[in-house]
Image (tube, rainbow, N blue to C red):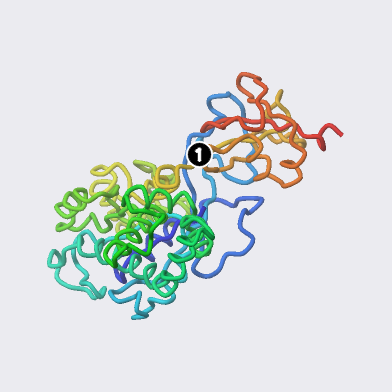
């Protein structure tokens, strides 16, 4: 699963992306083979099961810091968007080519209202950030409409001729946009349109369906950025009246904290509600002043900078993912090299034991016999649905041989 970081220019989108992808520690077994310039690795933060199970873990594909597991996830930094992107204006074509790969979106909004529709700087409080939400919705909807419009008569006739059902035909047409059959079915249910008679849909109904398809296939949350500015607080409350999760955010503060942590000036883990200064005597007056301002204006008021919270919500709530820990040695909760709880996988809700085996390795899935849940030592079958924080050992024909 991939999350796109989107927004118009000058909202702090690039700062958010930089803060989110500043690697806190080196991770072995890097999960993504190719990361292009506009892609990066962020982390989801979750309590590690090592504390509950009272073991000292040896993470390989992730990191454990004081009982907090940081698991790599892929983020896309999409090009800055301006109105008319779906018609090719600005970097519209580049933006839309990037967003097609995203399964969910974090929309970076200038909550202080200090950038206009085009992303140009303006006096704080003079721009309504709600307009930014509405224009992004419109841009993506009209882009999808443009893709389907030319083919719609043929799609509708094919459906009514009995040569395929509408969800299957649309899934085939839109598969490159991370749009799945379940998204199409949900959009049809929520619009209550007759999928057997698509030739009867008028233009408004087609656009309404596509708009619903956008919201189901590209779920979005709002990172209300620049909350340290005076005009932001009221706009955060107004944004919360929309049908979105809204996270108060200060990307600049998160980037400053992560860089300070990288230099060992402070002890800070992504998403913490505070930090500890390691050696106060080596901080300059300006550094100390900046850190105290972050503590008072951001962490003390909102509980975090919002960057890590936005990433977590995108994966755990918008995409409904869970974390599971596969092991080989049940007695020691280790792999065949003796490393304890070496891997943490983030997988979709409703993932079965056999599906997890396939995620780990194709051969493991093909030779699956059964699995064992480590806490209760309970044997489970291939269709057993895994739960968040499960520790699972998979037994396969290959392993037995």
In this view, the residue in front, 266 or 146, is: 146
| Residue 195 shown left or right of residue 347 in the figure | left
328 shown above or below 311: above
In this view, the residue in front, 25 or 125, is: 125
- Image quadrant where one finds the C terminus: top right
The answer to whether residue 101 of the structure is visible from this angle is no
Residue at 22 percent across and 72 percent down: it is 117
In this view, the residue in front, 218 or 347, is: 218
What residue sits right under mark 1 in the picture? 349
Q: Position of residue 61 (x, y in %)?
A: 62, 46
**Dot 1: few (<14), some (14–19), or many (≥20) neighbours within 10 Å?**
some
| Residue 312 shown left or right of residue 390 in the figure | left
Counting labels gives 1
Q: Position of residue 362 (x, y in %)?
A: 72, 47
Secondary structure category for the residue under label 1: loop
In this view, the residue in front, 159 or 42, is: 159
273 shown above or below 250: above
| Residue 62 shown left or right of residue 316 in the figure | right
Q: Residue furthest bottom?
A: 89
The answer to whether residue 251 of the structure is visible from this angle is yes
Q: Position of residue 198 (x, y in %)?
A: 38, 61
Residue at 25 percent across and 52 percent down: it is 293
Q: Position of residue 153 (x, y in %)?
A: 41, 70
* Residue 123 location, quadrant: bottom left
Q: Residue furthest right?
A: 401
């Amino acid at each position: 699963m991939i999350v796109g970081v989107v927004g118009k220019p000058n909202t702090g989108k690039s700062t958010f992306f930089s803060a989110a992808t500043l690697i806190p520690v080196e991770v072995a077994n890097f999960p993504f083979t190719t990361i292009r310039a506009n892609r990066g690795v962020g982390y989801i933060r979750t309590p590690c099961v090592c504390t509950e199970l009272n073991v000292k873990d040896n993470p390989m594909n992730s990191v454990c810091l004081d009982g907090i597991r940081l698991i790599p996830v892929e983020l896309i930094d999409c090009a800055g968007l301006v109105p008319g992107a779906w018609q090719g204006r600005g970097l519209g074509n580049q933006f839309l080519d990037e967003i097609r790969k995203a399964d969910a979106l974090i929309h970076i909004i200038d909550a202080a209202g200090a950038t206009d529709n085009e992303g140009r700087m303006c006096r704080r409080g003079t721009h309504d950030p709600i307009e930014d939400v509405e224009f992004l919705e419109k841009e993506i909807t009209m882009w999808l409409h443009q893709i389907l419009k030319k083919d719609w008569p043929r799609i509708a006739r094919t459906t009514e001729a009995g040569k395929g059902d509408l969800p299957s035909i649309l899934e085939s047409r839109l598969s490159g946009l991370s749009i799945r059959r379940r998204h199409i079915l949900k959009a049809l249910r929520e619009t209550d349109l007759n999928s057997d008679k698509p030739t009867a849909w008028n233009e408004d109904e087609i656009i309404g369906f596509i708009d619903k398809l956008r919201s189901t296939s590209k779920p979005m949350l709002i990172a209300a950025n620049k909350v340290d500015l005076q005009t932001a607080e009221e706009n955060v409350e107004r944004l919360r009246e929309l049908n979105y999760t809204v996270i108060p955010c200060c990307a600049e503060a998160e980037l400053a904290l992560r860089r300070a942590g990288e230099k060992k000036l402070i002890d800070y883990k992504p998403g913490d509600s505070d930090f500890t200064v390691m050696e106060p005597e080596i901080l300059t007056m300006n550094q100390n002043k900046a850190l105290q301002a972050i503590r008072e204006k951001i962490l003390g008021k909102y509980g975090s900078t919002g960057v890590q919270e936005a990433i977590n919500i995108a994966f755990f709530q918008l995409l409904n993912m869970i974390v599971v820990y596969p092991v080989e040695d049940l007695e020691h909760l280790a792999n065949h090299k003796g490393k304890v709880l070496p891997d943490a996988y983030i997988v979709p809700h409703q993932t079965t034991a056999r599906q997890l085996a396939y995620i780990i390795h194709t051969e493991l899935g093909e030779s699956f016999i059964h699995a064992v849940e480590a806490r209760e030592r309970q044997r489970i079958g291939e269709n057993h649905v895994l739960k968040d924080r499960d520790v699972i050992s998979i037994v396969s024909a290959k392993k037995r041989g």
